[in-house]
Amino acid sequence: MLFNSYPFIFLFLPITILLFYLAGRFSQNIAAAWLVIASLFFYGWWNPRYLVLLLTSIFFNYTVGVGLIKEQQRSGKSKKCKAILIFGLGFDLSLLGYYKYANFFMENINALTGSSFNLGEILLPLGISFFTFTQIAFLVDAFRGEVKGYNFIHYILFITYFPHLIAGPILHHKEIIPQFCSPETYKINFNNIAVGLTVFFIGLIKKTALADGIAPHAVTLYALADKGQALTFFEAWLGGICYAFQLYFDFSGYSDMAIGGSLMFGIKLPLNFHSPYKAVNIFEFWRRWHMTLSRFLREYVYTPLSHGRQKPWRLMLNLVITMLVGGLWHGAGWNYLIWGGMHGFYLTMNHLWRNLRRGFGQDIRISTPIGSFFGCALTFAAFVLSLALFRTHSMNGAMHMLSGMLAINGVALPLEWKSQFGSLEPLLSSLGIRFQAINARIEGTGFTSDAFKSVLYLGLIIWCMPNTQQIMAKYYPALNPYRGDKFQPSMLLWKPNFNWSVGIAIIAVIGLANITKVSEFLYYQF
């Protein structure tokens, strides 16, 4: 079931909310159990057989977690406690490895040895990366002595809770389970309903009108690369930016809908997305993009690798290893692994640059407006460049896209621009820039103008408008709000008044009207 679907919006969500609060008047456990049942129904909507896998994972991890808690309380981080942890992590990683990576590894073994082993088609269960990483964090924290024990109903709800189950955010037990334990959660709060609906419908319009609106342009240009066609500089960057904007509004829209939908149940989810394209360096980018994944990688991969005093080169190697894990988390393929490696390289280069600035006595916390502008532009360009690996369906397609972005195939401007810039043709020709019709390779007309206009108006929204959390700043709809904001849109702060009600109603109607076909969120595939 999709957030951006009529059955979810008009049936599942209102019925689940209504029965949740009705049950909450009599028993918190019944209300929580109802939310578990609803969440399992939501997950089983696509493929009910994967409910067995999900429930097996939950029962196993809860049992192991309880064992870890008891053993840790009895004897601390003993050998037995470590053995229990290794057993639990081994099960989780084996499960994830089989469903997500088995065929990838088998393909590479076949390529290296010339064998022809075949595991058959393995369908990737939705959300397996999210609920597996969530439970890995739970086990590790239990081993560390940071978990005191939880009610099983609250634990199973923590894992299955439908607003996060399919595409995040990656939850942390310390933040969520105490909310399930609070009596206030089970009492209807109309302020939460109003704020939640507002955030939900802002997310809906981002997905259905903005992300899905620009998606065909990205699909068309990336398809050329996947077919082996050489792209020019302009074509490659136009396609790359279109996909970057599609991914931005798709993920931002999902994150808003998850936060808004959850708040209607009185539960705040952690913030997972906060205007990452406004970041002035790659460190800041990863503090804004998929924030809960960044937190998981930092706390459960990078920090354990970097314990004790280590040399700078080793810390940077740990950073690269962490990002390689982040790349593989997104998918089983060399393109994802190289994408993670690229971001590890970006982060190490940024780390060296910061050290160089410190060496010259500069305060790295201070940046001039010009420095911030170029830092933001460079960070965005580096991310778009990396998406050539993230989006294409093959390494061959990625190489075609990258060669276009690096101007290896030449620089060509759209032929339809010749009427405006024809007088500059001699100068452009001397620089190796020509005019070429993109439409000659794409069915239909006006493609370039439509795509370019979409990029312009979406770019204005991304860089000139406040994001959802800034608009709702007075109400803190999410946990862990981003603290680096300098811009406070006082004129655009949401208020529960008539004007805002009309505005959100219009946004809701536009968002609902653009639900014209089944359109999954991009992060469903991860």
Image (cartoon, rainbow, N blue to C red):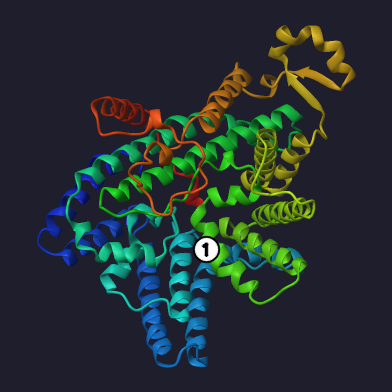
At horizontal 51% and vertical 86% (from top left) the residue drawn is 82
Residue 379 found in image quarter? top right
Q: Is residue 78 left or right of residue 401?
A: left
Label 1 neighbour load within 10 Å: few <14, some 14-19, many 20+: many
The x, y position of residue 102, in whole percent, is 58, 66
Tell me: residue 200, above or below residue 167: above
Q: Going 35% across and 52% down the picture, which residue do you hit?
A: 163
Q: Give left or right: position of 496 versus 305.
A: left
Q: In the depicted view, which residue is nearer to us: 183 or 333?
A: 183
In front of the other: 48 or 294: 294
Task: Name the residue furthest front.
Answer: 361
Q: Nearer the viewer, residue 353 or 346?
A: 353
Q: Secondary structure at mark 1?
A: helix
The quarter holding residue 224 reads: top right
Task: Report if residue 517 is visible in the image.
Answer: yes
Q: How many marks?
A: 1
Extreme right residue here?
Answer: 430
Residue depicted at 72% across the width and 52% down the height? 354
| Image quadrant where residue 202 sits | top left
Q: What amino acid is labelled 1 in the image? A: Phe
Q: Position of residue 278 (x, y in %)?
A: 58, 39
Instruction: For residue 332, say whether it is visible.
Output: no
- Residue 180 horizontal/vertical position (percent): 27, 63
**Pointer 1: what residue?**
296
Residue occupying image coordinates x 47% and y 70% = 137
What percent of the width, then of the height, locates residue 249? Answer: 49, 37
